[in-house]
Amino acid sequence: MEHTKGIIKGSKTLTLKPKDGGSLLEVNWDVKMSGLAGMFTGMIKKHIRNGTEQAMEAIKQHAERS
């Protein structure tokens, strides 16, 4: 997924791999901040990381119930 508009530009790659009879979902963000957001890059990246971890945990919980 490419993010090309706004102050955050870059990509998010989701990779699904087989692992030990199950699946492994990996997420990789490659983002750049522009304008004033550049001053808050660390804080914004931490927010993205935390949101991604919460989403991944929710996906895992749902998959394990199915």
Image (cartoon, rainbow, N blue to C red):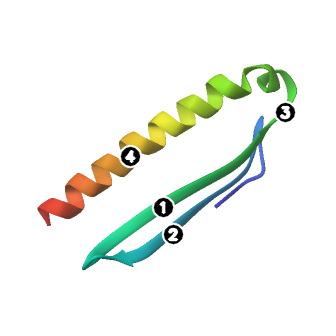
Which SS class for mark 1? strand
In the rendered image, residue 13, in percent from the top left (x then y), is placed at 60, 62
Q: Dot 3: within a 10 Å radius of its alpha carbon, few (fewer than 14), some, or many (20 or more) residues? A: some
Point out the frontmost of discs 4 and 2: 2
The Cα–Cα distance between marks 3 and 1, rounded to whole angstroms, is 26 Å
**Image-quadrant location for residue 63:** bottom left
Instruction: Tell me which amino acid carries mark 3.
Output: Ser
Q: Which numbered disc covers residue 16? A: none
Whether label 1 touches label 2, CB < 8 Å: yes
Residue 6 appears in view: no
| Label 4 vs 2, first from the N-terminus | 2
Which SS class for mark 2? strand
Q: Which residue is mark 2?
A: 15
The Cα–Cα distance between marks 4 and 2, rounded to whole angstroms, is 15 Å
Q: Which residue is mark 1?
A: 26
The quarter of the rendered structure image containing the N terminus is bottom right
> Which of the pair 12/19 is nearer the observer?
19
The residue positioned 47% from the left and 34% from the top of the image is 50
Instruction: Tell me which amino acid carries mark 2.
Output: Thr
Position of residue 53 in the picture relative to residue 40 (left or right)? left
**Image-quadrant location for residue 48:** top right
| Label 1 vs 2, first from the N-terminus | 2
In the rendered image, residue 59, in percent from the top left (x then y), is placed at 31, 55
Q: Which residue is mark 3?
A: 34
Q: Dot 1: within a 10 Å radius of its alpha carbon, few (fewer than 14), some, or many (20 or more) residues? A: few
Q: Which residue is mark 4?
A: 55
| Label 4 vs 3, first from the N-terminus | 3
| Label 3 vs 1, first from the N-terminus | 1
> Which of the pair 31/1 is nearer the observer?
31
Q: Dot 2: within a 10 Å radius of its alpha carbon, few (fewer than 14), some, or many (20 or more) residues? A: few
